Amino acid sequence: QVQLVESGGALVQPGGSLKLSCVASGYDFSTYAASWYRQTPGKERERIAGISNIISSTWHRDSVKGRFLISRDNAKNTLYLQMNSLKPEDTAVYFCYARVAGIEYWGQGTQVTVSS
């Protein structure tokens, strides 16, 4: 079955960096687009970055553009999110997402806390 497993979340000081990973299994990762979302308590989950399959074109939400970078390694079935210049408002649970054969799949989430 399809599984998405995130890792890399942590407590980091403002201005710091983190790299999140999401390992995909149960489907041909290279043929599907993937995205990163984040969610804070009381707010809707928001999409912050996406990457296409073959040519790996990317999209980033304005609030993270220039600070975050989505990438993928199809040989490792892994999606990444490099996060730099982190701000307290980036504190959230981060989820990876893929829509495979018309079905939506989410990882379990990884907590990122930006605080001094």
Image (tube, rainbow, N blue to C red):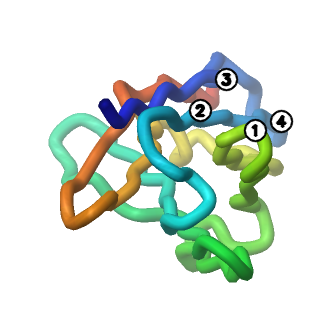
Task: Give the quarter of the figure containing the C terminus.
Answer: top right
The residue located at (76%, 26%) in the rendering is 13
Pointer 1 or 3: first along the chain: 3
Q: As shown in the figure, which amino acid type bears the numbered disc 1?
A: Lys
Q: Which residue is mark 2?
A: 23
Q: Residues within 10 Å of mark 4 (few under 14, many from 20)?
A: some
Q: As shown in the figure, which amino acid type bears the numbered disc 3?
A: Gly
Residue 16 image point, x, y percent:
83, 35
Pointer 2 or 3: first along the chain: 3
Q: As shown in the figure, which amino acid type bears the numbered disc 4?
A: Gly
Of badges 1 and 2, nearer the viewer stands 1
Residue nearest the viewer, comparing 13 with 4 = 4
Q: Residues within 10 Å of mark 3 (few under 14, many from 20)?
A: some
- Gap between marks 1 and 3 measured at Cα: 16 Å
**Which numbered tag is attached to residue 16?**
4
- Compared with 32, 111 (above or below) is above
Whether pointer 2 and pointer 4 mark residues with C-beta atoms closer than 8 Å, the reply is no
The residue located at (35%, 25%) in the rendering is 108
The residue located at (65%, 47%) in the rendering is 79
**Which numbered tag is attached to residue 36?**
none
Element at label 1: helix
Pointer 2 or 4: first along the chain: 4
Residue 88 image point, x, y percent:
58, 40
Residue 97 image point, x, y percent:
39, 51
In this rendering, position of residue 94 left or right of residue 62: left
Pointer 4 or 1: first along the chain: 4
Element at label 4: loop
